[in-house]
Image (tube, rainbow, N blue to C red):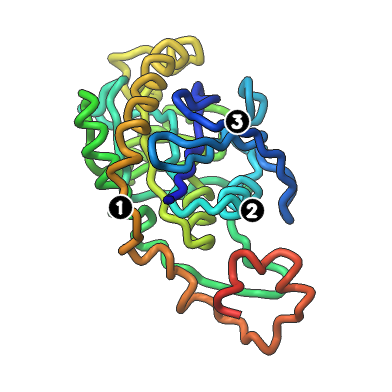
Amino acid sequence: MKTIGVIGGSGLYEMEGLSDVKTVSMETPWGKPSSNLLTGTLGSVQMVFLPRHGTGHTVSPSEINFRANVYAMKAMGVERIISVSAVGSLKEEIEPGHIVIPDQFIDNTKRRPSTFFEGGIVAHVSMADPVCSVLSGCLRKASLGCGGTVHSEGTYVCIEGPQFSTRAESHLYREWGADIIGMTAMPEAKLAREAEICYSVIALCTDYDCWNEDHDDVTVSDIIEIMNKNVETAKKVVAAVVDTIPEERGCPCGGALGHSIITSSDCVTEETKNNRFELIVKKYM
């Protein structure tokens, strides 16, 4: 049975329709995840759900323990992560309520640990194509099937937050060629790649950030109204996509570390390997 993880963003704090539901509390080598994990089955698929900001939205973007979240997914046997993320639009044609399945990221965060590989083992994974093309393709089809207006690709610029961007920054990101702006895809995508987990994002547009002077500047109250509608769409997409994801992985995500670990195994102590790295590197060392 394939195991699919869902990391819920703003407004998505639970998964409906699961059977055999269990709550799992976990402590990882990087501390505790944002919340307890919820496991269950959806049709013939094993699901693991984690609210990125905690139940009730108590964890700020800069406080998210991304390493613990991704590690917990790995420990639960997850091979694919569907990330649900609320974003602002940097393009006129991407309207609030639209769905974007981004294929590129710009990491503009400033103070987040972004790798598992420190303290004795060094690895350099490729991030040229930062999402799983197979998983993203399944999400595009499912989103279209649910009646959403879907943009099949785009560049997501991830900012530190929790403040929204200045107008100058918003215009700068547009000059960079970014399509949407959010606060949570990085370093989540990087860590998923290091953990050899397929990763893709359902980005749900809530606003036009602050570059578009024909629209009011973004406010939390405006976001919440559209976000609630978007969350219902996200739930439908997740329910529709799980059975369309292939049982076996034919993408390169599952071998991302195959040519990425640069540290000689002779230089890695058993204590180092077993302390934090065994789950991630055991098939290579």
Q: On the image, which quarter does residue 140 sit in? A: top left
Which residue is located at x 39 percent, y 41 percent?
Answer: 44
Marks 1 and 2 sit apart, C-alpha to C-alpha, by 32 Å
Type of amino acid at the residue the image marks with label 1: Pro
Q: Which mark is residue 246?
A: 1
Q: In the rendering, at what x and y percent does residue 274 appear?
A: 73, 70
Marks 3 and 2 sit apart, C-alpha to C-alpha, by 17 Å
Secondary element under disc 3, as helix, strand or loop, is: loop
Q: In the rendering, at what x and y percent does residue 244 appear?
A: 28, 43
Type of amino acid at the residue the image marks with label 2: Pro
Which residue is located at x 61 percent, y 80 percent?
Answer: 285
Secondary element under disc 2, as helix, strand or loop, is: loop
Which residue is located at x 43 percent, y 50 percent?
Answer: 1
- Above or below residue 218? Residue 133 is below
Point out the tag, 1 or 2, that comes first from the N-terminus. Answer: 2
Q: In the rendering, at what x and y percent does residue 215 appear?
A: 32, 14
Q: Is residue 57 left or right of residue 185?
A: right
Q: Which mark is residue 113?
A: 2
Q: Nearer the viewer, mark 1 or mark 2?
A: 1
Secondary element under disc 1, as helix, strand or loop, is: loop
Type of amino acid at the residue the image marks with label 3: His
- Above or below residue 116? Residue 31 is above
Along the line of sight, which residue is nearer the eye, 166 or 225?
225
Can the viewer see residue 284?
Answer: yes
Marks 3 and 1 sit apart, C-alpha to C-alpha, by 29 Å
Along the line of sight, which residue is nearer the eye, 175 or 150?
150
Residue at the limit of the structure toward the right, as seen here: 271
Point out the tag, 3 or 2, that comes first from the N-terminus. Answer: 3
Residue identified by numbered label 3: 53
